[in-house]
Amino acid sequence: MSDVAGHTERVRQRTHEGFLAYKGFRWAQVATALCVVAVGVYFVAASRLAEPPSGGSWLGYLLGTMSAGLIVWLACLGIRKRVITAGHYSLKAWVSAHVYLGLSLVVLGTLHTGFQFGWNVHTLAYALMMLVIASGALGIWAYATLPERLHGNRGETTRKQMIEAVESLDRQLADLAQPLDRAGAEVVRRSIEDTEMGGGFWTRLTNDHRGCANKRAMVQLRALPNPPSARQAEALTRIEQVMKQKDAVLTKARRQMQITAMLEGWLFVHIPATFALLAALTAHIVSVFAYW
Amino acid sequence: MAQEFHLRLITQRAGGGDPIVRDRSISGGEATIGRAETNDIVLADLTIDLAHARMRFSGPGRVRIEAVGGQTFQVGGREVQGADLDISARPEVVFGSYTVAFGPAPDDDALVIVTREEDEHHLSPSDFSLKAQVFGRRRMSWILGAGILLLCLVLPLVAVLSGSKLLINPQKQWQAGALSKSHAFLQDDCKACHANAFVAVRDDTCQSCHDATPGMAEKALARSRDLGSPFKPLLVADHAPRERLSDGTPPPKGLGAIGFYAQTLLGHPTDRCASCHIEHTPAGKGPDPQAPLSDKPKLAVVHDCESCHTDLSKRLESTSIANTPDKRFPNFEHAPFKAMIVTEAGPKPKFQRAPLTSAQAPTEKNGLIFPHDLHMDPLGGVARQAIDLGKGAGYGAALECASCHRPDAGGKAFRPIEMERDCGSCHSLAFVREGGQLRYLPHGELQKVVDTLAGRTLIAPGAERARPRILRASIYTASGASAYRAAFSPGGACYDCHTITWEGDTVRMAPVSLTQRYLPKGGFDHSVPEHGGPGTSKKGGFKCADCHAAKTSDRTADVLIPDIAKCATCHGKTTAQIAAADDADCTTCHAFHRPGQATPTPGHPPLKALQWTKVASR
């Protein structure tokens, strides 16, 4: 028996299976079935309900309970992923279920509303849920496509090498600039000290580095008056070459940062929106039952 | 001997470890500082000028340091262009990233230690990851979550518990939907209906404004006024006592059962007022979600009539109400109508409901002598007299139903028969002419008639058959105490219609009691054109005579009410079968809150009609 288990284990290790395709899309099938059943029941039952469809009908309560339970369970991924277990349910299985059941919430949650929306805490909870799901969907796209682009961009260069390259070029610049007068030295100093490889959240996400200190320094370098000595002139020429090299390395590193930001950025919406959702959901449930 | 600067250059190793220390002496009592290699002290910092400063001994134990190109340096944290330094105080001068520290040396020389502050900041591969300083994921999560919890849950709860009124009602965000117009005045007063937290709206809350029970109605009106209702609430009665309703209601079947048991278990039972009359929901179930607010709460029928009445006797053994098979009329045998008939006339008449079966037609004992056929005969004496009365008197042709049966204010039913108004045009009660004016006998009070006529001498000329409102002279030719006998004798005013007996001189008259409503358990609207009412009837509609066989009825005892088969001529038919076809739902004739009436159409009466009068609202 152990031989058989060992054999399957080896096979599984050999063929990589992402969280999306986990166990032949098992959770995609479960989620689809859930949605189909929910939609079917809704359209059969909703027309037979005495009242207009809403979260307050028996069907509404059923869908609402399921949705709330799912939301809490989905949010538990944050806890599950921090725990290392040897249990039956692998993290990959959890993520796979998280993704597909999370997407099924679009259907369950929407049906729960009975398509009644308003400016209230109930619709706030719904809107936040949709925001969480939408950001999560962005995350699926990011995880499915970006790692390849990340690899394609950096080629054989590692991140560490990129940093070292910039630092090495900065040292060269500092050395080359020593004979320069005050104005020239200032230009080079700005390139060394003020150049930011990454930048803020949006700068990274948009990869908009128009204000890059190195780029500005290159412009200013060309605007400098002709140097009095041949030694300084030669230094300036070499400095320009090094700055160009630095710019190339920066461009590649920044593209790397942008892809990384896109890969991680959705979490900056997904996680806070999840917390907001849990709070709004609590308010939604308490208020509904307080004024039953 | 000139003083010397003993220069010590300390350079940190890039990879850590012991720093490199180089010593050198500068003679001549003066030294230049700058980035250019020609300087005595070379500071390889791009912020420093090629020739930045110059220093020299300015006295015993003192050094003067001055900028050359107008650039500054720092002494004691201040940017200066020149400074006198007391070497014994071990001063430090900062040039960019370099620190030049002075100290005393033997022979009044100065020790100058030059160190470089290395920029410790280095990027690491982890810097490729997103790190938002202000809006970190964790911080943002807690702020957002706590903020929403505070604004959407805690604040409204505090407002509820403290009862404080804020400019913006924080509970408003809890409202799932607007209230109907009739209840809109309660929009900000959640507790008016949601009296207890976590307890579903109870019937007594609704009844506190809508209870029609005698004794409670006044309180209900007062409460609704206190709450600020601009409308007079509709007062409604229960369909049946609550226990009987509960016993008679079957457990639901199919999908609805899930909701029934779940909601009952969770304290949200489905037999409450609010189970059918739902609020906070859009007006229309139709495709337009922006439909205007409905006037009244939306009606969601939880149980229809059939669900309880199909086999009611199984669950409610003591019921006297017939079961209705689980089919809609006319596809089932609706029990024959049971007409309410008089079995004993008198001051306290006795009524009884008798089935209208053709085999054994019920008869009434209303005490009146009134043959319909005689009055309806178009060629008879009554018709002749009606023609003689003329149009000016409201006749002018043979009698028809409306000649005597006058519709009530709503037109749905008829006013009670009044002898003077409905019979008096022909059956005159005039008994004497005094001062040119006719005087009439008081109808309905036997003793007053006797007293009026007693002791009179009534002689009046005239024909045997008198016109209405003209004295019938021959009758009253009696005089003295027996004058009244004439009125109660054959040919007298009372004798035609009333059963008279004599005990000596004492006249006895059988009491008369007429049924006002023969079918009290269902609503029938006479004002409908197809029911003989005014207006143009659709083809197949009925006239009075189609249902009421008055023309052939020769005795008062006849009950001229048709059975349900008549209704089935149109009700339950399709327009293809008969143009006058109409619904045959239970609600066409019966109502939940008023079983003896047809169910009012939704929105009836209009909300506007329920506004308090201006006086009442003050």
Image (tube, rainbow, N blue to C red):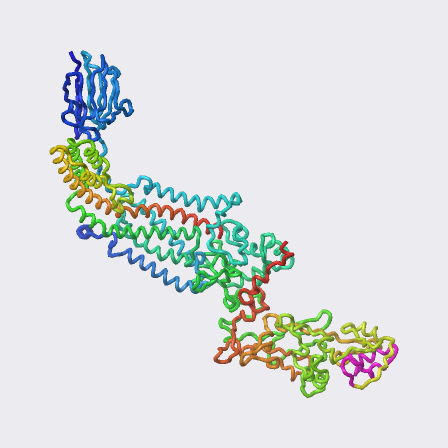
In terms of image quadrants, where is residue B402? bottom right
- The residue at the point 52 percent across, 71 percent down is B585
* Horizontal side of residue B596 vs A241, given as left or right: right
Q: Quadrant of residue B4?
A: top left
Residue A225: x percent and y percent?
18, 36
Q: Is residue B396 left or right of residue A31?
A: right
Q: Is residue A8 magenta?
A: no
Q: Is residue B142 above or below residue B231?
A: above
Kindly identify the residue that appears in the image at 61 percent across and 81 percent down: B545
> Is B265 rendered above or below residue B406?
above
* Residue A124 seen from this side: yes
Specify start and end residues of the magenta stretch as a single range: B465-493
Residue B53 screen position, x and y as percent: 21, 23
Residue B467 belongs to magenta span: yes
Q: Residue A107 appears at what percent x and percent y?
A: 35, 57
Residue at the spot 81% in from the left edge and 74% down from the top edge: B449
- For residue A1, say whether it is visible: no
Check the picture and name the quadrant holding the C terminus of chain B.
Answer: bottom right
